[in-house]
Image (cartoon, rainbow, N blue to C red):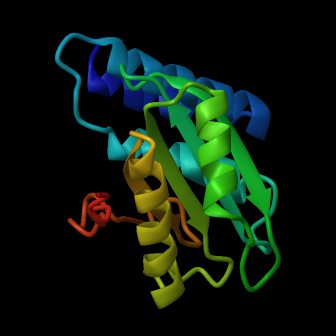
Amino acid sequence: LSLADDAEAIDAVTRMNVKKTTTGLVKCWNRHHSRAGAKAVNVGIAHRIIRMLTVGASTEIEHFAAVFLDSASRVQGYHVWEGGTKGVQFKAAEVVRRAMTHSATQILVGHNHPSGRMFPSPSDIAMTKTLATACGMLGITMIDHIIVGAHDDQHYSFAQANNMPIPDAIY
């Protein structure tokens, strides 16, 4: 299978309901990462998974999603926190606890901005560093934090922008 096959599958599943779409996108993600040599994160699929988890239910409320991955980058589970129009409250410890429950060695996180603005706020940047540090303390790699905007093609990837924080050294 090629990335073109994945793109075709992604387009097909985005026409389904949210639960079926998320399941379809997870299958695309796992298929991509089960190929020999597929080491890089497919930002296109990652962005669509985050979009479906965060915007699928409502575009007017902020949602934060965490996708838990094993060492082969296969999805083991996910969780979505629901907030309000101005933000979503969660603790880094809760995200890490859920990651450990799924035996995750990697985590992909993201959230939507109901305003449609896709660039990170100062609090988004601080939270990303806090979460990356908390994950790093337990040997979990945070591979990306994706912010989705108002339109399907709008997203900001901390990894793609080379802005993923390096967790503070722990001594």
Does residue 17 appear in this view?
no
> In terms of depth relative to the viewer, which is nearer, 169 or 104?
169
> In terms of depth relative to the viewer, which is nearer, 143 or 96?
96
Does residue 49 appear in this view?
yes
Q: Quadrant of residue 115?
A: bottom right
Q: Residue 29 at what x, y percent from top left?
A: 45, 27
Q: Residue 38 at what x, y percent from top left?
A: 23, 22
Residue drawn at 79 percent across, 75 percent down: 60
Which quarter of the rendered picture does the N terminus lie within?
top left
Residue drawn at 52 percent across, 46 percent down: 48
> On screen, 92 above or below 46?
below
Q: Quadrant of residue 32?
A: top left
Q: Residue 120 at what x, y percent from top left?
A: 45, 80
> On screen, 148 above or below 100?
below
Q: Residue 106 at what x, y percent from top left?
A: 42, 37
> In terms of depth relative to the viewer, which is nearer, 111 or 141?
141
Task: Name the residue at the front extreme.
Answer: 171
Left or right relative to 93: residue 75? left
Residue drawn at 26 percent across, 61 percent down: 169
Left or right relative to 11: residue 45? left
> In terms of depth relative to the viewer, which is nearer, 75 or 132?
132
